[in-house]
Amino acid sequence: MQALSSERLRAIIHENSINRALLAILPTLQIPHCMLVAGCLFQTYWNHRSGQPAEWGIKDYDIAYFDQDLSWEAEDRMITSVHQACAQLGVNVEIRNQARVHLWYEAKFGAGYPALKQVTDGIDRYLIRSTCLGIDVGTGELYSTHGLDELQRDLLRMNALNPQPELFKAKADSYRARWPWLTLQEN
């Protein structure tokens, strides 16, 4: 099997009409250090691999950005702006300031979380290694913390940068319910 290149993965990601729309809309909103991230990227790839429609089974479309303003009010303004700009898409769009995650993560997930220094730091800490992906909305460049090998090999393996076995298992089970051919690999 030929290695999955970032160019090929970006082409597959663009097969999803919602991803294409978001990558057109988001640069117009002047969101600092903004990336389209997570499920809408790797789940589009899994849909491509399994012959499903590109948008099938994707529960939400995640946007990460990094703004030094740590106030809830600033993030709420950004959330409102993005929701208004994307309302016509008819999907759940989630946007979060990665600079603020450490302020609420422990209360929501029960584990501490370090203050991040840039938007990609959040991607680096996704629970499953093969899902640590993002596309810079300004440049279109693909970011992948661990490379694309595990994604191409359909592996779900816990990320040592955020070792939370219970959350990992729940997320992996959710993915395997929709894409049952994915392989769970214990570290």
Image: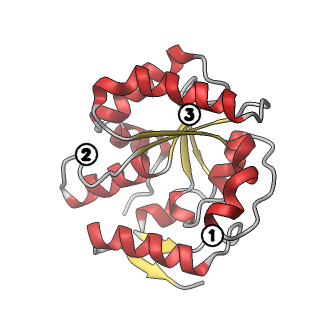
Q: Position of residue 136 (x, y in %)?
A: 57, 32
Mark found first going from the N terminus, 2 or 3: 2
Residue reaching furthest to the bottom: 186
Dot 3 lies on which element? loop
From the image, which quarter does the C terminus lie in?
A: bottom right
Q: Mark 1 Cα within 10 Å, few/some/many (few <14, many 20+)?
A: many
Q: Residue at x 32, y 34 (%)?
A: 18
Q: Mark 2 Cα within 10 Å, few/some/many (few <14, many 20+)?
A: many
Q: Is residue 170 left or right of residue 67?
A: left
Mark found first going from the N terminus, 1 or 2: 2
Q: Position of residue 19 (x, y in %)?
A: 37, 35
- The residue carrying mark 1 is 159
Kindly identify which numbered label has been placed on residue 54: 2
Q: Residue at x 34, y 26 (%)?
A: 87
Q: Quadrant of residue 72?
A: top right
- The residue carrying mark 3 is 141
Tell me which colouring the rendered structure shows. secondary structure
